[in-house]
Amino acid sequence: MYWVYILKSNSNNDYVIGQTADPEDSIDDHKSGREENTNTAYDWHLVYSKKYTTRTEAQKAEEFIKSQQNNKFIEQVITGRIDLDTLPESA
């Protein structure tokens, strides 16, 4: 199983989107500053996760979310207003 996750930092109001086979380890890496792109804050917390059967599916969902480059879109994914299961096949 693979996961897409979204973390949020309240101190800088930023989001991190990732995919992994081990969500707990990835989240710990972000919280500890071991991940270069998140070492500016240490208050990362999980606000969204979704399980996928294959890494390819998880990568497609991660890339689609990142390609939007829009916090409003990310917040709609988090609240369930956008369902990643309904992504177009080309996404």
Image (spheres, rainbow, N blue to C red):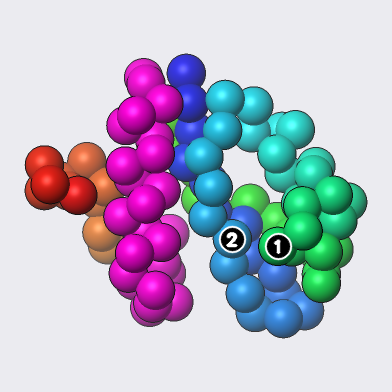
**From the viewer's perspective, is 64 left or right of 35?**
left
Q: Residue furthest right?
A: 32
Residue occupying image coordinates x 42% and y 69%: 75
In magenta segment, residue 15: no
SS majority, magenta? helix
From the viewer's side, name the closer residue of 37 and 48.
37
Quadrant for residue 38, please give it.
bottom right
Q: Residues within 10 Å of mark 1 (few under 14, many from 20)?
A: few
Q: Is residue 6 above or below residue 28?
A: below
**From the viewer's perspective, is 90 left or right of 50?**
left
Disc 2 secondary structure class: strand
Residue occupying image coordinates x 85% and y 49%: 34
Q: Is residue 86 visible?
A: yes
For the record, the magenta segment spans 53-78
Report which residue position mark 2 lands on. Answer: 16
Q: Are marks 2 and 1 in contact (CB under 8 Å)?
A: yes
Three-letter code, disc 1: Asn
Report which residue position mark 1 lands on. Answer: 37
Three-letter code, disc 2: Val
Residue occupying image coordinates x 62% and y 74%: 14
Q: Earlier in the sequence, mark 2 or mark 1?
A: 2
Disc 1 secondary structure class: helix
Disc number at residue 49?
A: none
Q: Is residue 52 above or below residue 19?
A: above
Q: Residues within 10 Å of mark 2 (few under 14, many from 20)?
A: some
Q: Is residue 90 above or below residue 13?
A: above
